[in-house]
Image (cartoon, rainbow, N blue to C red):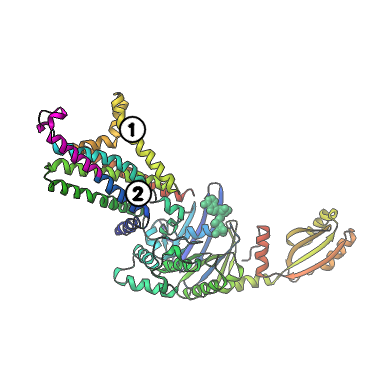
Amino acid sequence: MKKKTVSSSVVRFEHVSKKYGSVRALDDVSFEINAGEIVGFLGPNGAGKTTTMRILAGFFAPSRGKVWIRGIDLFRHPQKAKRSLGYLPEAVRLYPDMRVAEFLRYVARLKDVPRKSRNIHVQGKMALCGLTDVGHRLIGRLSKGYRQRVGIAQALLGDPDVLILDEPTSGLDPKQIAEIRALIRTLGKERAVILSTHILPEVSMVCSRVVMINQGKIFASGTVKELESCLKDRQEISVRVKGRVYRQGAIDLLKGLPGIEALRMREEPGEELWFIFEIAREEDPRAQITQLFVQQNIPLVEIQRVKLTLEDIFLHLLQEGRFARRPS
Amino acid sequence: MKKIFVIAQKEFSSCFHSWLGVLVGTLFFILTGVFFMILVLSYAKISMNPQQFGLSSLAGVNQTQFVFGSFFTNCSLLVLFFVPLLTMRSFAEEQRQETLELLFTYPLSDFEIVAGKHLGLVWFFELLLLPLLGYLAVFHWLGGEFDWGPVLSGFLGFWLLGLAYLAVGVFISSLTRSPVVSALGTLSVLLIFWIFDWVETISDGPWARVFAALSPLKHFRDFTMGILDVQNVVYFAFFFLYFLFLALASIETRNWKH
Ligand SMILES: Nc1ncnc2c1ncn2[C@@H]1O[C@H](COP(=O)(O)OP(=O)(O)O)[C@@H](O)[C@H]1O
Ligand SMILES: [Mg+2]
């Protein structure tokens, strides 16, 4: 085996694919994560986030591709590689019949925390996650917010370099969400944190970098600033037409315009159609469109011009299930 | 490897977290006690009045054989029903509660997980065996005499039989996410193995010999008669390892199907 690059990345996915039977959940996914980064995996439900997190945590092997954790092949030397990983599953499930401190001590032993420092180590993580007062309680009797904290505490045991958090705030109330986000920001200072979410504001609040994923593919990645700046030169134009009979005519006309992308159509009640597309910032095709539509006798009712935001991309993604452009 | 013990300790102590473990333990204790008393009492009755039972004297009846041989045979029937209750939670409960996901992401091998689960149950089973030693003491105290050989080999056989049944149960438990299905499935498989033992009594073709060779009870019976045959020990070792590795294969399937 040839030695893999001496990159500084803590986590490295190489052409990873995963199939469940005939369902392709991940399709040739590659990315890298460095120490000190909080990376957000953003995507709608069914995008493949949980599948990515599970592979990264070593729960199951990918159908294809390789995963490196600090230069160690996760699926060739799983035990060694897993020492650097802490994982919080989506909607974490813990043994309901164990007590919080008892469970954490059990996990600490499984994670090779040395016997001498084990108690102090466990107490430290309990304090960090605000669990000191519930150490003797049965996990099954805890509220959802507290169970989530136990989940984070067990991930932190053994001080892993990589923390994997699958939808860490889902199902919590606003106060708990704020607390968990604050905790994640603190944790991200020393280690690499990968969290998945379908909530966009969470990414801009917590993460230093975002990877957007849909239908098993990464379609955009970069810092929140980078993504926004690459959108700055894009704009979205919406054209409203009255009369469904003009549908094909309008599509043909718009397709004929230079530089338009991601053309889509939405039907409105009352015989009205919206055509929406994207185009470079410098262009202003509104006058041209008006002229063309009038020439063809297509009743044009309205033209709108909007600057695209990160939120917009994400909303399109959610509505359409696809996204045409690939910011680099 | 030391993590096998960590897992085993947790499995063992979780046997006491549920009513089931305590109930199974208590019932086993009571039922074996009743068996033992009945056997001792009926032996006492025969020995006081052998002629009445068609025996000219007691010389022909081996006390150890009479009490302990039948005792272990009865116990073997008892574990047939108790083992499915002990193993039903092992993997099935974790699959139902989805708690395995975390376990698989800790730095330990699948083998350590499976072996630990087995070991924890083996410890619990051994705990159930402890009272049997108590019966032995009581018997001795009452003035009963016995040969150590057959008693110890009976214990060994019963222990091996229990381990073999536990391995079947843990494997079946790994196939399902329902403890009830696990218990019923294990019971069915153990009953099928039990029937293997009868085949030789109804036919004696080559197939009958194969079934007999595979039957755990047939190998177990030698132990209760005080016969220590290495072949029987090897048989149980293979039986145990075979089902242990089936369980291992079963939990590894998460890598290719889910
Ligand atoms: N255990 C499974 N068996 C079959 N298909 C699955 C399984 N888990 C996920 N999938 C499918 O794989 C795709 C990705 O799922 P997932 O990774 O859970 O997405 P996300 O976490 O982003 O919502 C979905 O289409 C989902 O239906
Ligand atoms: Mg998910």
Which residue position is annotated with label 1? B195
Horizontal side, residue B174 vs residue B59: left or right: right
Which residue position is annotated with label 2? B86
Horizontal side, residue B136 vs residue A34: left or right: left
Q: What x and y, as percent, mark residue A258?
A: 77, 62
Viewer-proximal residue, A229 or A103?
Answer: A103
Viewer-proximal residue, B253 or B174?
Answer: B174
Give the magenta-colored segment's residue range: B34-60
- From where the camera sits, is residue A164 visible? yes
User: At 30% across and 24% down in the image, what residue appears?
Assistant: B203
Q: Is mark 2 within 8 Å of ligand 1?
A: no
The answer to whether residue B47 is magenta is yes
The three-letter amino acid code for the residue at tag 2 is Leu
Q: Tell me which numbered mark, 1 or 2, is placed earlier along the sequence.
A: 2
User: At 77% across and 66% down in the image, what residue appears?
Assistant: A237
Q: What x and y, as percent, mark residue B146?
A: 12, 42
Q: Magenta stretch mostly in which secondary structure? A: helix
Helix, strand or loop under label 1: helix
Q: Residues within 10 Å of mark 2 (few under 14, many from 20)?
A: many
Q: Chain of mark 2?
A: B
Viewer-proximal residue, B63 or A66?
Answer: B63
Q: Residues within 10 Å of mark 1 (few under 14, many from 20)?
A: some
